[in-house]
Amino acid sequence: MILPILEFPDPRLRIKAKPVAEVNDAIRGLIADMLETMHEAQGIGLAATQVDRHIQLIVMDLSEAKDTPLVFINPVVTPLCEDKAPYDEGCLSVPGFYETVERPARVRVNALDRDGRAIELEADGLLAVCLQHEMDHLNGKLFVDHLSSLKRERIKKKLEKLHKQQA
Ligand code: QAP
Ligand code: CO
């Protein structure tokens, strides 16, 4: 089932996600819906916050063929180095806008997979960027919060105008 995606500046994108208590069939159903929603929207990452579910759950698919879903439940992301790397980021909740954000270049993630098993991996490149971007969502933060207030306000005004036209 395709779920509606909240768009900036919707205040519900600011809600902090709570841990998933039990990885059960209800969670696996939401994971399937989030993957379907992300793929249909041509995204590479989606946090539960973006579909108005305020639990610590992230889905991603960085593969060319869109056949390698990644699932992170109750993720903890730890930077592994001091140096920052820039990346031109976008977001399904900020459609049409891309800006450069700098983040730690290497991270470790500890999480549960869709079967509730503990996973740990180290990431750099796009996976490291995506993990940190999606982790921000679970904390009520958006990539536009890393930009100057001038840039952020410009994006906000343009999206608010589009939303009024759509209403
Ligand atoms: C987060 O973003 C991300 O504006 C995932 O019109 C982005 O999937 C992590 C998208 C970049 C690392 C690098 C955005 C689709 C998808 C749009 C997305 C749009 C259509 C964004
Ligand atoms: Co996003």
Image (spheres, rainbow, N blue to C red):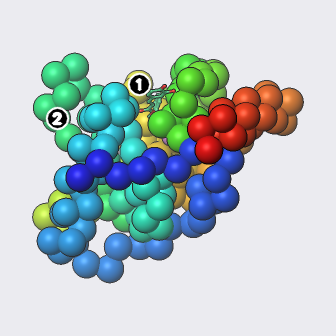
Instruction: Report whether 55 appears left or right of 158.
Output: left
Q: Quadrant of residue 123?
A: top left
In the image, is the residue at mark 2 within 8 Å of ligand 1 by its beta carbon? Answer: no
Query: Residue 96 in the image: x percent, y percent?
Result: 56, 24
Instruction: Report whether 30 appears left or right of 151.
Output: left
Circle 1 crowding by C-alpha within 10 Å: few under 14, some 14–19, many from 20: few
Residue placed at 16% from the left, 22% from the top? Answer: 65
- Residue 68 has which mark? 2
In this rendered view, identify the residue nearer to me: 137 or 12.
12
Query: Residue 138 in the image: x percent, y percent?
Result: 51, 58
Q: Quadrant of residue 107?
A: top left
In the image, is the residue at mark 1 within 8 Å of ligand 1 by its beta carbon? Answer: no
Residue placed at 29% from the left, 29% from the top? Answer: 62
- Looking at marks 1 and 2 on the same chain, the residue that comes earlier in the sequence is marked by 2
**Could you tell me the amino acid type at mark 1?**
Gly
Query: Residue 111 in the image: x percent, y percent?
Result: 31, 59
Look at the numbered disc 1 and give the secondary structure of its residue: helix
In this rendered view, identify the residue nearer to me: 66 or 130.
66
Residue placed at 32% from the left, 80% from the top? Answer: 21
Which residue in the structure is indicated by mark 1? 125
In this rendered view, identify the residue nearer to me: 14 or 162.
162
**Could you tell me the amino acid type at mark 2?**
Thr
Q: Could one spot residue 146 in this view of the protein? A: no
- Residue 46 has which mark? none
